[in-house]
Amino acid sequence: MGIAAALPADRAEICPGDVVNSWQAIHFPLASLLTRGGDERLRIDPATGLNVYGCAPHPRTGTIEFCSSTASSISETAFARIGQARDALVRDMAARGAETAFEQQVERMRRSLLLMLGLVGSGTDVVFSPSGTDSQLHALFLAKLALGGPVTSIVCAADQTGSGTAFTSRGQHYSASTALGETVEKGASIDGEAVTSIPIPLFREDGTRRSAAEIDHAVMSAVEREIASGRKVLLQIMDSSKLGWRAPSEACAEAIALCWPRDVQIVVDACQLRSGRTRLKSALERGWMVLVTGSKFFTAPGFCGATLVPRALACRIADRDAPNGLAAYATRFDLPAQWQRLRAALSAEPNFGQWLRWEAALEEMSAFYALPSRFAASLFTRLSKAVPQIMAGSRSLEWMKEEGGCPLDRADGEMPVPTVFPFFVKVSSGRLSHDAMVNLYRVLNRELALGSNNDERRAAATLCHIGQPVKLPCGSVLRLALGARTASEAWHGDEAVIERNVKRIIENIHTVTAKIDLLAEQS
């Protein structure tokens, strides 16, 4: 069912940027609310009922989904939760007014997120945002407040971050409109202050991977140069990229923080949230900001981002005035209630879409973290062995098996092994181009009438949603990604049922590869 079919006839034309009052907006159908409070990436194509990432604003039963490295459609359980949350908010709004009721809901959500991540009592503050891209801007705003002086952004793994990073790292508008509905000039400075940006890619220009030592050296050298020139540094390090890689090494980041504690602010890009909770807590204890989302590993509908702010940094900036430009990218509800001075100049308009997307994320987090100890790690370990074997048996898939950046920490709690599996697609003329991979990615998510036998026809007719292609110097790769829902839906109190569930996951992976093989031959 497309978005138009999910709306009443008089609301079928509603778009994310439409201006309405809070009481009207909260009564929109849930599917409509999930597309609001973000940028144009949330818009639904009426021809397909999907957004640009192939996701629907309602559950897509019958679809095989290994797409958590990009974006996911909402699950049935999460959809039920946001319905209940919306009903509760409507009652509170009627009793207390929209602003007070929404403030209380967001503060409760803030506490719930800290609880899920094991951060209660750590002094961590949460700044919500519509996306990880917006959270990058929030981190820059906060770093400039804390550091003072001219700031340089150094972005590690710049070739494996979102496309908006090229703009956010310079303090520029990354789109022609903001999630709050403001029309802006893409590429223009947000606050009028120039920010230098230095990208540190994980690939060399010839397409080969940089070694961990080479990456560490490049990061350290860039920081040294900028500090020597009298500038402050916001260093964005990568903790699980689009391909599941990390960089620089912890030793390198720690050395930088120790050498220049007043001149460098580190922010960890953990937007994929493929990091154990111990790692997140450790980064915050060091005084580093951490960027997270609920819409990658945890499979909530895009977009829902957050900046985790350590106690020491929050104490330095909470009593400051809001910097120029922040009001275009945050409401007062996004910032913690105790940051009263920073919040004063920001809009009090509730962002219901962002709130509901985070409610969906909390539902998925709750299910995942409620699993028995080590179950997820054991499941991911098993699947991390099965996926390459399945790809090896494919006629067209070529697994990109070598990891880049720094090795994963095999003792990293819930995430001891890779959960993102990038692969090339081969045809008789060689690997598919990036444009061809984009087309393949879209066609996989459609029901097709192809095949010469029942197995092929069944695979072709199955909707398969996987991670969108990533363009690299060595070619273009699609991604098969395991997410939190992979584990929570596999769990059962009966071992025999678990085994059947795991076998179904493996069968689904076979179906995806079979459909790709069929399409590659058709190409």
Image (cartoon, rainbow, N blue to C red):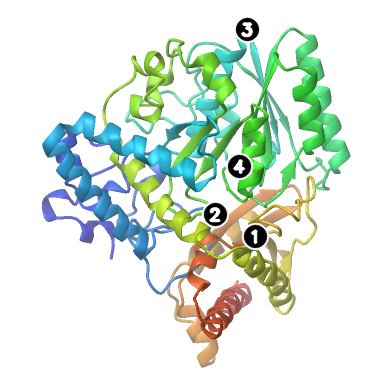
Callout 2: SS:
loop
| Circle 2 crowding by C-alpha within 10 Å: few under 14, some 14–19, many from 20 | many
Q: Earlier in the sequence, mark 4 or mark 3?
A: 3
Q: Earlier in the sequence, mark 1 or mark 2?
A: 2
Position of residue 424 measured from the top left corner of the image (x, y, whole percent): 70, 63
The residue most toward the front is 121
Kind of residue sitting beneath label 1: Thr
Nearer the observer, 375 or 294: 375
Q: Kindly indicate the quadrant of the structure image that contains residue 158.
A: top right
348 horizontally vs 317: left or right: left
174 horizontally vs 363: left or right: right
Q: Label 1 vs label 4: CA separation? A: 14 Å
| Pointer 2 residue | 297
Which residue is pictured at 51% across the width and 33% down the height?
307
The numbered mark at residue 149 is 3
Kind of residue sitting beneath label 3: Gly
Q: Earlier in the sequence, mark 3 or mark 1?
A: 3
Q: Kindly indicate the quadrant of the structure image that contains residue 340.
A: top left
Kind of residue sitting beneath label 4: Ala
Check contact, mark 3 vs mark 1: CB within 8 A.
Answer: no
| Pointer 1 residue | 419
| Pointer 4 residue | 270
Check contact, mark 1 vs mark 2: CB within 8 A.
Answer: yes
Q: Earlier in the sequence, mark 3 or mark 2?
A: 3
The numbered mark at residue 27 is none
